[in-house]
Amino acid sequence: MIKNEANHYSKSKPEAHPYVDIQRRAHLGYGPTFKENWHEEIQLYYLTSGTGLLRCESEKIDMQSGDIALINSNELHVLESRCMKLSCYVIRIDLASFFSLMPGPRHTKYAELLSQQLICFCHLIRKDPRILHCVRTLIREDEMQNDGFELAIQSSLLELLVLLLRGYVTKIYTKKRFNTRMISLNQLKSVISFMNENFQKSMTVAELADQALMSEAHFCRTFKKIYGETVVNYINLLRVDKAVDLLQSGSLSITEIAMAVGFNDANYFSRVFKRKKGITPQAMRQAFNHSKRALENQRPQGSSIVT
């Protein structure tokens, strides 16, 4: 087999550059590839095979092989697989640490704005050969670690940031506006974590608003503004995502799955599922089974699928 971006798994290695982390990931099956999360670093997803849906706060973006997604600091996000096997590289960049190690550039205007997380970039980068070249260079230098790779990674990161600044900036916050946003985010973070951990339980908007220390009306407005969904729709989406995992296991009936993820009515569950995923639970289960059989028929005797 020829080694390429879609099938190569690099060996683990000691951390050589504390400001950037590059990982190779593969996900089998449909549904979220990880739990919804946020972090202070910016993050890139470079899809090397498969198709996916990126949910980043209020945006939903269809992704295909060759696309690059960019997650800004403190944006709640999840990448959902829309195929039986999705492969990607995940590149997380700590800009504050990066510029702190570079005495020259860190005092420039844009270095300070980037370090303070005041600049936001658009979420999808598609068919940009210059940025694609930077990303592939970062991956290659990180994997090969030839002489001078640390300098090559620094150089590629600087080039990448320049290209982003010149073509992909969506907004630049003032410190006051950024602080206001962070206050709202911090109030909502504990609520989002609670919802993710207790999605199968009954919860009211009033209870969640109390937890966020907001009035119910202010909580609903702030939640919708930041995440692009009503609270009820967000909870239903969490439940549907969990249902996708259960459908792939094949051990529970549709009614049992509905009850397990927090729906009290299987018919209502099916309607919500189709509205969110564009397909009924039963049809998705049939698609899973068909894809699994196809994969098994393609595998040589005695081989196994690596996850």
Image: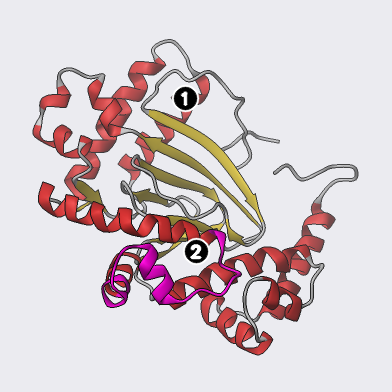
Q: Is mark 1 on a helix, strand or loop?
A: helix
Disc 1 target residue = 142
Which is more foreground, mark 1 or mark 2? 2
Disc 2 target residue = 195
Label 2 Cα crowd, 10 Å radius (few <14 / some 14-19 / many 20+): some
| Front residue (pair 184, 132) | 184
Residue placed farthest to the right in the image? 301
Quadrant in the picture for the N terminus: top right
Location of residue 216 with respect to 98 vertically, above or below: below
Q: Of the residues shown, which amino acid type is indicated by label 2?
A: Met
Location of residue 244 with respect to 278 vertically, above or below: above
Location of residue 120 with respect to 61 vertically, above or below: above
Is residue 266 left or right of 91 when viewed as pictured? right
Q: What element carries label 2?
A: helix
Q: Where is residue 20 in the image (x, y as percent from the top left)?
A: 39, 29
Quadrant in the picture for the C terminus: top right
Q: Position of residue 18 (x, y in %)?
A: 39, 23
Bounds of the magenta segment? 197-220
Q: Earlier in the sequence, mark 1 or mark 2?
A: 1
Q: Where is residue 277 in the image (x, y as percent from the top left)?
A: 55, 75
Name the quadrant containing residue 21: top left
Q: Of the residues shown, which amino acid type is indicated by label 1?
A: Asp
